Image (cartoon, rainbow, N blue to C red):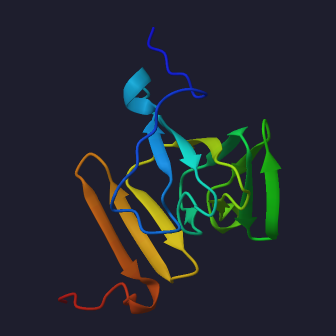
Amino acid sequence: MRRFNVLSAPTASDESDPSGYQAKTARIGPEIGMQKLGGSVYELPPGQSVCPYHWEAGDEELLLVLRGEVTVRHPEGEDALGEGEIVCFAAGPTGAHKVTNNSAETARILMLSEMIEPAITVYPDSGKIGAFDKPSSTRMLFRIREAVDYYEGEVT
């Protein structure tokens, strides 16, 4: 049996993350052999977010606050969540969310999600859509306003 301690596992920064999104991360899946679920522990310094406001087309996600307090933006507004609180983000627009630490102390959270591949993510604020496939390392983002008709460019 492989173990992972979500309360004490070390997290690491991604130096390419811009200001406002500088969360430290520890990926759970590779550590314990998860195949159908994805999981990460995030350390969120004050003023930082996990990622931009988004929703997943096929994946349901779960957030558990392990330490501190975070603010969750969602389609109905914003709510503060404290230690031990858990929420679910449904697949689709009703599950849109952004997790931010608006407190003065570092927060620690656990995010779990399904790992349906390829993944489709929509970013309402920036008008982008992303297609991601880990097995092939595919990562494509597009402006939704540049969408074309199904038959555009096809030969008859």
For this view, does 125 lie left or right of residue 66?
left
- 121 or 86, which lies in front? 86
Residue at (36%, 53%) from the top-left corner?
Answer: 14
- On the image, the x and y values in percent for residue 111 come to 59, 43
* Vertical comparison of 28 with 24: above or below: above
* Vertical comparison of 132 with 41: above or below: below
Q: Is residue 115 something one can see in this rendering?
A: no
- 75 or 94, which lies in front? 75
- 150 or 56, which lies in front? 56
* Vertical comparison of 28 with 53: above or below: above
For this view, does 44 lie left or right of residue 83?
left
Residue at (67%, 54%) from the top-left corner?
Answer: 90
Query: Image quadrant for the C terminus?
Result: bottom left
Query: Image quadrant for the N terminus?
Result: top left
For this view, does 137 lie left or right of residue 22?
left
For this view, does 101 lie left or right of residue 151?
right
- On the image, the x and y values in percent for residue 148 come to 37, 89
Residue at (54%, 68%) from the top-left corner?
Answer: 52
Point out the residue furthest to the top here: 1
- On the image, the x and y values in percent for residue 39 come to 51, 38
What is the total number of numbered labels drawn onto the structure image?
0
Asked which quadrant contains residue 66, the reply is: top right
Q: Is residue 13 something one can see in this rendering?
A: yes
- On the image, the x and y values in percent for residue 20 come to 53, 68
Residue at (48%, 15%) from the top-left corner?
Answer: 3
